[in-house]
Amino acid sequence: MISLTHPEAAPSRTRLRSSALAIVSVAGLVALGVGVLAPRSALAAPDIPAGAHFTSWADNGKAADDGKSGERVLQLVQGDLPKGTGIVAGVVKTDTACDEDDASLNHCHNVIALAGGGEIEVVLNHKNSRTLCLSPGDRLTLARLGGGWLVAKED
Protein backbone atom coordinates (compact mmCIF):
# COMPACT_ATOMS: atom_id res chain seq x y z
CA MET A 1 0.00 0.00 0.00
CA ILE A 2 1.26 3.48 -0.84
CA SER A 3 1.45 5.99 1.97
CA LEU A 4 0.06 9.42 1.16
CA THR A 5 2.72 10.94 3.37
CA HIS A 6 5.48 9.56 1.21
CA PRO A 7 7.06 12.48 -0.75
CA GLU A 8 6.82 10.68 -4.10
CA ALA A 9 3.15 9.76 -3.67
CA ALA A 10 1.73 13.21 -2.93
CA PRO A 11 1.90 15.97 -5.54
CA SER A 12 4.25 18.72 -4.51
CA ARG A 13 3.01 22.24 -3.86
CA THR A 14 5.22 23.40 -6.70
CA ARG A 15 3.54 20.94 -9.08
CA LEU A 16 0.09 22.03 -7.89
CA ARG A 17 0.97 25.71 -8.37
CA SER A 18 2.39 24.99 -11.83
CA SER A 19 -0.75 23.07 -12.80
CA ALA A 20 -3.03 25.82 -11.49
CA LEU A 21 -0.99 28.47 -13.32
CA ALA A 22 -1.18 26.46 -16.54
CA ILE A 23 -4.96 26.12 -16.24
CA VAL A 24 -5.40 29.85 -15.58
CA SER A 25 -3.07 30.68 -18.50
CA VAL A 26 -4.99 28.43 -20.90
CA ALA A 27 -8.31 29.87 -19.73
CA GLY A 28 -6.97 33.38 -20.29
CA LEU A 29 -5.77 32.55 -23.79
CA VAL A 30 -9.12 30.97 -24.64
CA ALA A 31 -10.94 34.08 -23.41
CA LEU A 32 -8.57 36.31 -25.38
CA GLY A 33 -8.99 34.15 -28.47
CA VAL A 34 -12.76 34.33 -28.23
CA GLY A 35 -12.55 38.13 -28.07
CA VAL A 36 -10.15 38.32 -31.01
CA LEU A 37 -12.11 35.85 -33.09
CA ALA A 38 -15.50 37.41 -32.32
CA PRO A 39 -16.94 38.80 -35.53
CA ARG A 40 -16.61 42.50 -36.14
CA SER A 41 -20.36 42.45 -36.72
CA ALA A 42 -20.89 42.21 -32.97
CA LEU A 43 -19.90 45.87 -32.80
CA ALA A 44 -22.66 48.45 -32.74
CA ALA A 45 -23.40 50.58 -35.78
CA PRO A 46 -22.19 54.18 -35.54
CA ASP A 47 -24.58 57.02 -34.78
CA ILE A 48 -26.35 58.36 -37.85
CA PRO A 49 -24.67 61.63 -38.84
CA ALA A 50 -26.45 64.97 -38.88
CA GLY A 51 -27.79 65.76 -42.34
CA ALA A 52 -28.62 62.14 -43.24
CA HIS A 53 -32.00 61.68 -44.89
CA PHE A 54 -33.01 58.65 -42.77
CA THR A 55 -33.40 57.71 -39.12
CA SER A 56 -32.32 54.04 -39.31
CA TRP A 57 -29.28 52.46 -40.98
CA ALA A 58 -31.75 49.93 -42.39
CA ASP A 59 -33.06 52.72 -44.66
CA ASN A 60 -29.65 53.95 -45.87
CA GLY A 61 -29.82 53.92 -49.68
CA LYS A 62 -33.45 52.79 -49.80
CA ALA A 63 -34.79 53.09 -53.33
CA ALA A 64 -36.69 56.23 -54.22
CA ASP A 65 -40.29 56.09 -55.42
CA ASP A 66 -39.07 56.10 -59.04
CA GLY A 67 -37.22 52.83 -58.40
CA LYS A 68 -33.75 54.37 -58.64
CA SER A 69 -31.28 53.68 -55.89
CA GLY A 70 -31.44 56.31 -53.19
CA GLU A 71 -28.64 58.32 -51.67
CA ARG A 72 -26.23 56.34 -49.56
CA VAL A 73 -24.39 57.83 -46.61
CA LEU A 74 -20.83 56.49 -46.48
CA GLN A 75 -18.45 56.58 -43.54
CA LEU A 76 -15.01 57.75 -44.71
CA VAL A 77 -12.29 55.42 -43.37
CA GLN A 78 -9.24 56.37 -45.41
CA GLY A 79 -8.40 59.13 -47.89
CA ASP A 80 -10.51 62.17 -48.69
CA LEU A 81 -12.22 63.92 -51.55
CA PRO A 82 -10.05 66.51 -53.32
CA LYS A 83 -10.05 69.86 -51.52
CA GLY A 84 -12.25 72.57 -53.02
CA THR A 85 -14.53 70.18 -54.89
CA GLY A 86 -18.27 69.94 -54.52
CA ILE A 87 -19.18 66.73 -56.31
CA VAL A 88 -16.65 64.11 -57.39
CA ALA A 89 -17.19 61.12 -59.66
CA GLY A 90 -15.95 57.73 -58.54
CA VAL A 91 -16.03 54.05 -59.46
CA VAL A 92 -16.35 51.27 -56.87
CA LYS A 93 -13.32 48.94 -56.97
CA THR A 94 -14.06 46.54 -54.09
CA ASP A 95 -16.84 45.36 -51.81
CA THR A 96 -15.75 43.32 -48.77
CA ALA A 97 -16.70 42.44 -45.17
CA CYS A 98 -20.45 42.50 -45.81
CA ASP A 99 -21.47 39.98 -43.14
CA GLU A 100 -24.63 40.79 -41.20
CA ASP A 101 -24.29 41.88 -37.58
CA ASP A 102 -26.58 40.90 -34.70
CA ALA A 103 -29.06 43.64 -35.71
CA SER A 104 -29.21 42.33 -39.34
CA LEU A 105 -27.22 45.32 -40.62
CA ASN A 106 -24.29 45.13 -43.02
CA HIS A 107 -21.12 47.20 -42.72
CA CYS A 108 -19.52 46.79 -46.14
CA HIS A 109 -16.03 48.12 -46.86
CA ASN A 110 -15.58 49.69 -50.28
CA VAL A 111 -12.60 51.15 -52.09
CA ILE A 112 -13.63 53.83 -54.59
CA ALA A 113 -11.35 55.18 -57.33
CA LEU A 114 -11.85 58.93 -57.74
CA ALA A 115 -11.98 60.74 -61.07
CA GLY A 116 -8.73 62.59 -61.53
CA GLY A 117 -6.78 60.05 -59.45
CA GLY A 118 -6.61 58.79 -55.91
CA GLU A 119 -8.97 56.57 -54.01
CA ILE A 120 -10.89 56.45 -50.77
CA GLU A 121 -12.04 53.67 -48.47
CA VAL A 122 -15.53 53.87 -47.00
CA VAL A 123 -17.97 51.79 -44.98
CA LEU A 124 -21.55 51.45 -46.16
CA ASN A 125 -23.79 50.77 -43.15
CA HIS A 126 -27.06 49.40 -44.51
CA LYS A 127 -29.55 46.53 -44.55
CA ASN A 128 -28.82 44.34 -47.54
CA SER A 129 -32.40 43.06 -47.77
CA ARG A 130 -33.55 46.65 -48.48
CA THR A 131 -30.55 48.14 -50.29
CA LEU A 132 -27.96 46.15 -52.18
CA CYS A 133 -24.28 46.54 -51.52
CA LEU A 134 -22.15 48.69 -53.77
CA SER A 135 -20.54 46.52 -56.44
CA PRO A 136 -17.26 46.82 -58.31
CA GLY A 137 -17.90 48.89 -61.41
CA ASP A 138 -20.73 50.97 -59.91
CA ARG A 139 -20.36 54.63 -60.91
CA LEU A 140 -21.07 57.17 -58.19
CA THR A 141 -21.17 60.88 -57.55
CA LEU A 142 -19.81 61.75 -54.12
CA ALA A 143 -20.27 64.85 -51.98
CA ARG A 144 -19.22 65.77 -48.44
CA LEU A 145 -21.79 65.48 -45.68
CA GLY A 146 -19.37 66.58 -42.95
CA GLY A 147 -17.51 65.05 -40.06
CA GLY A 148 -16.01 62.14 -42.02
CA TRP A 149 -19.20 61.28 -43.89
CA LEU A 150 -20.04 61.36 -47.60
CA VAL A 151 -23.22 61.14 -49.64
CA ALA A 152 -23.13 58.91 -52.71
CA LYS A 153 -25.58 58.62 -55.60
CA GLU A 154 -25.35 56.04 -58.35
CA ASP A 155 -25.01 57.44 -61.87
Image (tube, rainbow, N blue to C red):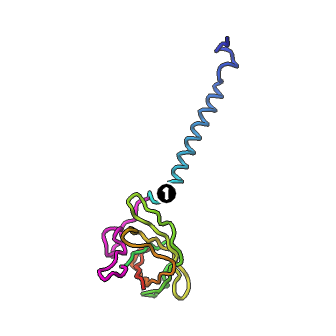
- 10 versus 83 height, above or below: above
> What are the residue bounds of the magenta stretch?
43-69
Residue 155 in which image quadrant = bottom left
Q: Is residue 64 magenta?
A: yes
Where is residue 43? Give x, y as percent.
44, 59
- For this view, does 129 lie left or right of residue 99? left
As drawn, which residue projects farthest toward the top? 1
**Amino acid on which disc 1 is placed:** Pro
On the image, numbered disc 1 is attached to which residue? 39
Quarter of the N terminus within the rendering: top right
Choose between 129 and 76: the one closer to the eye. Answer: 129
Where is residue 127? Give x, y as percent.
38, 67
**Mark 1 Cα within 10 Å, few/some/many (few <14, many 20+)?**
few
Choose between 63 and 111: the one closer to the eye. Answer: 63
Where is residue 28? Give x, y as percent.
55, 43
Q: Identify the residue at horizontal 31%, vertical 72% (top origin).
A: 54
- For this view, does 69 lie left or right of residue 14? left
As drawn, which residue projects farthest toward the left? 65
